[in-house]
Amino acid sequence: MKALLTKLTIPICSIAIAALAAGCASTSGVKNPSGVPVTHMNADEQGFVAGTGIESQDLVMVADKMARSILSIPQIANAPTPPTILLDPVDNQTRFPINRDIFLTRIRAQLNSKARGKVVFLARNQMEALEKERNRKREGSVTASSDPNVQEFLGADYLLSGTLQGMSTRAKAGTSDYVLYDFHLTDVRTSAIVWEDSAEMKKQGLEDAAYR
Amino acid sequence: MKALWQPTLLAVFLTLAGCATTTKHQVALTGDIMVDAPNAIANGPPRDRVLWEYRLAAAAMRQGKYDIAKQNLDEALLTLGGIYGKDADAKQARSYFHAEAKKTFIGEPYERSMAYIYRGIIYWMDGEPDNARACFKSAEFEDSDSEQHQYAGDWVMPEYLDGLVTTKMGGDGSDAFKRAQADARGVKLPPYNVKANAIFFIEFGPGPTKFATGQYKEELRFTTVPSPVASAELKVDAFQIPIAPTDDVAFQATTRGGRVMDHILGNKAVFKSTTDTVGNVALVGGLATAVASNNRTAQEVGLGVALAGLVSKVVSAATVPAADTRSWENLPRYLSFASVPLPPGQHVATVQFLDGAGRVVPNLTKTITVNITTTDRDKVVFVSDTSITPQTL
């Protein structure tokens, strides 16, 4: 009898282990069933979450290229006094909604940090707050280090504008998105475009057949 | 012999413990979308999250809760934009033994297009017409992979609005206008008026929903309840504008054509049917052989064949070819649009919904007070036949 029990225990335990494995199989085929911990990525590298749209690595690449390119033009590099630049919101003509200011913010920050003093950006988006502060100074409700009645708000020498244009294709083979990033600097006095540069990006992808 | 219970119990316990790894997401529904959707998004199956976000966004738009709509559409579109490459749930949905509904819901192209259209409307409301245009372009793009090319990218309103935004921003929107007019099927679209600063989006009628046909419910179909509303009329100041449908969401749902997934589901159905037939034949044949024969070897072979038939039947029973019928069912049937120039000040806009005979449908008239504070920026008004009004914008 004991021999029989010994004989049967092994197969039954094997069945139990197999059953356990079968039970655990509910996550088989699931990639990263326990999730993925937060991963620190550089803004200029493609992460494991990616689409065919405008992403951080595109922003960094384009903004860096534009900032370097602007600094090399004679109107900026050889200017006796730092020219003043006004940022114009980017005209997004692609199929991807974006934060319109993010490219120009990145370019401005890059220029301000790498070429300190060579250009001056105007904070027109803060005009309301600036005017309020100037009025307080004029009224004498706050101190002023100079005569507040003198107009000191600067006018722009150049206007920095950008346009994002796209071409998209969808076919059985997948989705393809091409985006052209074009930026230009316009002399506000003469309307002459004194600098223009562009960058381009093309991305393709195909979703799982279950979504097609 | 009594000692045999211990390993047997262990086996049962381990099996149950193994099964316990499958998380159940049960959500009790109250019937109030504004309660059910947030609950389902937070506690329901992750694969249905986008569906509930879509539903909640549409319901919130009709209640004038655009912040809620925006948040949920952004979440949904983030998922929609990142579906490229390998996807474990989608892989399961393609397998024989899982239903298509196992995949993360992102909707059929008409549903995805509607998500972009709604998001575009909100962008425009927020003073970002270029991002609105981006959404309208994406709405067209989602519809660009129809089986028959004539129905690819044939939404009228997104194309028209793409051109209108371009024109308003100083560009040339004439190409988009021509494409929209070509798709308009009998409706003459109004020429662009860049001075029209009050933009009215109007939707009405119950939209399409999904159901499945076929022996194993493997064929995805769409159905639409006849709309009691056939058109509308907008009155604001001295303007009295007839509103004809420019887009029919049901038309968009039914003209997409066959999906790749339909082919996969068809294969699943064939596999299920074949394994079932093989199982029947083997089971009956094997048992008959075992019963009829006096030969021990023939009996054993017969029982073996019957056992194989049984396995085949089990495999057949486990095969799930059913199509995914999860629907964004609070979509409208018809979309339309009007724009008028309004000076700064307060204006009362009334939208009446009309039946097929042109009679006003009772209890559906909507009143919206529109405050124009500047002519530099468009005022965007969204009105549905299920909107809760009066609203002040």
Image: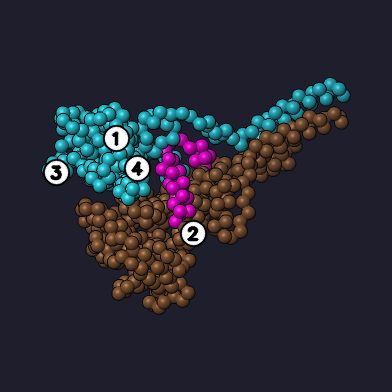
Chain colours: A cyan, B brown
Q: Which mark is residue A107?
A: 1
Secondary structure under badge 2? helix
Q: Which residue, given by chain and number where applicable, does mark 3 sit on?
A: A189
Q: CA distance from mark 2 to mark 1?
A: 40 Å
Residue at 75% over, 35% down: B12
> Are the residues flagged by discs 1 and 4 from a single subunit?
yes
Q: CA distance from mark 2 to mark 4?
A: 53 Å
Q: A125 or B388, which lies in front? A: A125
Q: Position of residue A149 (x, y in %)?
A: 25, 47
Secondary structure under badge 1? helix
Q: Position of residue A190 (x, y in %)?
A: 12, 43
Query: Is the residue marked by circle 2 packed among few (<14), some (14-19), or many (20+) residues within 10 Å?
Result: many
Q: Which residue, given by chain and number where applicable, does mark 4 sit on?
A: A143
Q: Which mark is residue B59?
A: 2
Q: Residue furthest top?
A: A3
B44 up-or-down from B189: above or below: above
Circle 4: residue type: Thr
Query: Is the residue marked by circle 1 packed among few (<14), some (14-19), or many (20+) residues within 10 Å?
Result: many
Nearer to us of marks 2 and 1 is 1
B350 up-or-down from B322: above or below: below
Q: Chain of mark 1?
A: A
Q: Position of residue B66 (x, y in %)?
A: 44, 56
Quadrant in which the C terminus of chain B appears: bottom left
Circle 1: residue type: Ile
